[in-house]
Amino acid sequence: MPKKGMLIVLSGPSGAGKGTLCNLLLQRRPELALSVSVTTRPPRPGEVHGVNYFFTDRENFEQMIRKGEFLEWARVYNNYYGTPRKFVEEQLEAGKDVILEIDIQGAKQVKENCPDAVFIFILPPDIEELKNRIKKRGSETEESFNLRIKSAEEELKAITNYDYAVVNDDLKAAVEKLESIIIAERCRVLRNMDLIQFKAPGGD
Ligand SMILES: Nc1nc2c(ncn2[C@@H]2O[C@H](COP(=O)(O)OP(=O)(O)O)[C@@H](O)[C@H]2O)c(=O)[nH]1
Ligand SMILES: Nc1ncnc2c1ncn2[C@@H]1O[C@H](COP(=O)(O)OP(=O)(O)O)[C@@H](O)[C@H]1O
């Protein structure tokens, strides 16, 4: 039976660089599977349905909740976001490590249901740089920008629930740290019990 994959959860405030880091990580580690979330948020220019998100409306999202189709879901910055359960379970069963880029509420639900998951918090170097990055991305209205900055403080408090903190200052260094965490986590004894196949001499 193939070894089950590991679940890797990435969270952090808006603008910390989660999406950018995920893309770079996948280029370096194409064996990873990235879960594409469902959201009621309207697409930003350039975002592609099925690649960045599965975009849907509130009614369909609520139906998916009722049918138990989400591994976790949450309301974030006035929209709904959820992780499709089926994709994640299939990938893990096939031995693939799966990345979830989700908010702190979703991560809490995953921690309750999948305690073996690895939890990584992505931080910006400081709040000014966070503001600059969101502005530079140019994706938010003033209201949405303010909501993201206001939420960042609360989100940072959740960092103690995570296993690792990665400051995304220099992009290349941050990706290398993420890769190193994944490599180290794959070596954990508890994830490698199938290696212990030998029997003590004289034993039956
Ligand atoms: N709980 C949960 N949060 C998600 C999911 N997908 C994305 N998010 C989070 O929703 C928040 C908003 O994401 P997005 O609209 O792309 O805005 P951005 O963070 O400013 O790029 C971020 O904190 C994401 O990590 C999901 O499936 N579940
Ligand atoms: N290390 C970095 N240095 C400078 N700019 C960055 C860095 N990482 C990400 N960015 C930029 O910051 C903005 C926000 O990044 P993004 O990946 O969308 O953040 P998140 O997914 O956390 O909201 C983007 O314009 C991205 O190009």
Image: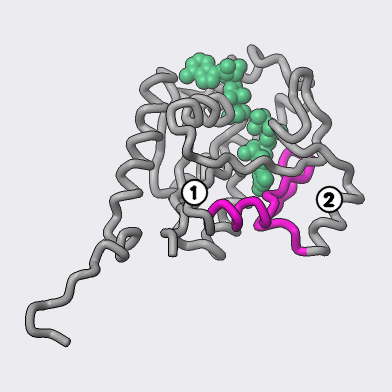
- According to the picture, the residue beneath numbered tag 1 turns out to be 96
Looking at the rendered image, the quarter that the C terminus falls into is bottom left
Q: Nearer the viewer, residue 63 or 1?
A: 1
Crowding around mark 2 (Cα neighbors within 10 Å: few <14, some 14 to 19, many 20+) is many
Residue under the point 29% across and 50% down:
187
Q: Is residue 76 left or right of residue 154?
A: right
Residue located at (67% from left, 49% from top): 83
Which residue does the numbered mark 2 point to in the structure image? 61
Residue type beneath disc 1: Lys
Instruction: Decide if residue 129 is in sight here.
Output: no
The residue that appears at 57% across and 57% down in the rendered structure is 110
Magenta-tinted stretch: 68-92
Mark 2 or mark 1, earlier in chain: 2
Query: Residue 27 has which mark?
Result: none
Q: Position of residue 37 (x, y in %)?
A: 69, 42
> SS for tag 1?
loop
Callout 2, which amino acid?
Phe
Residue plotted at (46% across, 53% down): 6
Task: Please tell me in which quadrant of the rendered image residue 120 appears.
Answer: top left
Q: How is the image coloured?
A: one colour
Q: Is residue 147 magenta?
A: no
- 91 drawn magenta: yes
